[in-house]
């Protein structure tokens, strides 16, 4: 699962994903329903644009579903009502990130946030799906979801609670971005796999990340695992 993440500096995203955006704000605490930078394949080129994080299906007439659509599980890409059409239409995208947060449930029931990055990619991409939904007044909503899959060894130790434990986002290696965006369904499905634990780092961070009002570099700084969660 992925419920919060850090967007990279725009120049870094453009350099690593070979695409340009008009402009977007770098954030250390991206939350669901916010607009996020996305890369998709359109008219033979990579296109950078902003989308709502939390997919609004085409059939929803622009109204966000009451159920969560920030994550699309790999097991239901071909059958889930929200995911089936984007998957069949090859509406695949990449969400650039510098890192993401997950919460670990401790023996006393408290939840401690961790910040996770990739050793080999200071800027990496989540595999995602996107869709277009048009309201009755004609307003268009472009939105996206991050694909999740069973967790690797590192993420199993961290993501041990919640309604969908032992999950992780689908992280793409640099060489996998192209087949994900432009390949066949079989090509795209083949790159959806666990990112190696050996190429990931995780450390505990303070509780300020729990509030979406907080958005600064200190959110990603490591803290000691004390008896009380630092705020």
Image: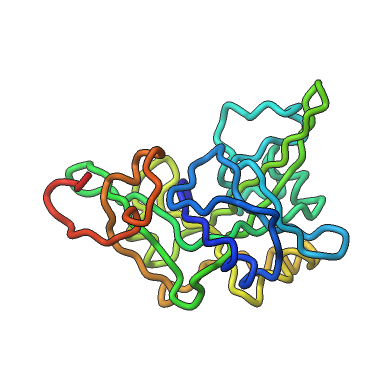
Q: Quadrant of residue 211?
A: top left
**Is residue 173 shown above or below 166?**
below
Foreground residue, 74 or 95? 95
Question: Which residue is at a point 61% across and 72% down the rendered structure image?
Answer: 16
Q: Which residue is farthest right?
A: 43
Residue 196, can we see it? yes
Left or right? Give the position of 113 relative to 11.
left
Residue 1, can we see it? no
Left or right? Give the position of 110 relative to 217.
left
x and y percent of residue 206 in the render?
Answer: 26, 51
Question: Which residue is at a point 63% across and 72% down the rendered structure image?
Answer: 15
**Is residue 135 shown above or below 55?**
above
Question: Which residue is at a point 44% across and 65% down the rendered structure image?
Answer: 152
Q: Quadrant of the C terminus?
A: top left
Left or right? Give the position of 197 relative to 89.
left
Foreground residue, 174 or 79? 174
x and y percent of residue 25 in the render?
Answer: 55, 50
Question: Which residue is at a point 83% across and 26% down the rendered structure image?
Answer: 138
Foreground residue, 35 or 154? 35
Tally the numbered discs. Answer: 0
**Is residue 84 shown above or below 170?**
above
x and y percent of residue 88 in the render?
Answer: 80, 51
Foreground residue, 166 or 47? 47
x and y percent of residue 40 in the render?
Answer: 74, 57
Q: Quadrant of residue 43?
A: bottom right
**Is residue 176 shown above or below 64?**
below
């Amino acid at each position: 699962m992925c419920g919060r993440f850090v967007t990279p500096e725009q120049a870094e995203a453009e350099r690593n994903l070979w695409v340009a955006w008009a402009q977007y704000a770098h954030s250390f605490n991206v939350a669901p329903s916010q607009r996020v930078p996305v890369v998709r394949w359109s008219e033979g080129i990579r296109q950078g644009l902003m989308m709502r994080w939390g997919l609004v299906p085409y059939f929803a007439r622009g109204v966000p579903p009451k159920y969560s659509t920030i994550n699309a599980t790999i097991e239901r890409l071909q059958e889930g009502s929200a995911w089936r059409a984007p998957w069949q239409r090859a509406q695949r995208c990449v969400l650039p990130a510098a890192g993401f947060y997950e919460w670990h449930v401790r023996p006393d029931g408290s939840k401690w946030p961790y910040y996770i990055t990739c050793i080999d990619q200071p800027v990496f991409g989540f595999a995602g799906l996107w869709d277009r939904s048009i309201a009755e007044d004609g307003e268009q909503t472009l939105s996206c979801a991050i694909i999740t899959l069973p967790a690797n060894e590192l993420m199993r130790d961290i993501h041990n609670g919640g309604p969908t434990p032992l999950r992780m986002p689908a992280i793409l290696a640099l060489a996998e971005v192209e087949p994900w965006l432009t390949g066949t369904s079989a090509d795209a499905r083949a790159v959806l796999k666990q990112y190696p634990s050996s190429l990931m780092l995780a450390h505990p961070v303070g509780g300020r990340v729990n509030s979406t009002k907080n958005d600064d570099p200190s959110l990603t700084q490591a803290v000691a695992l004390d008896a009380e969660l630092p705020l």
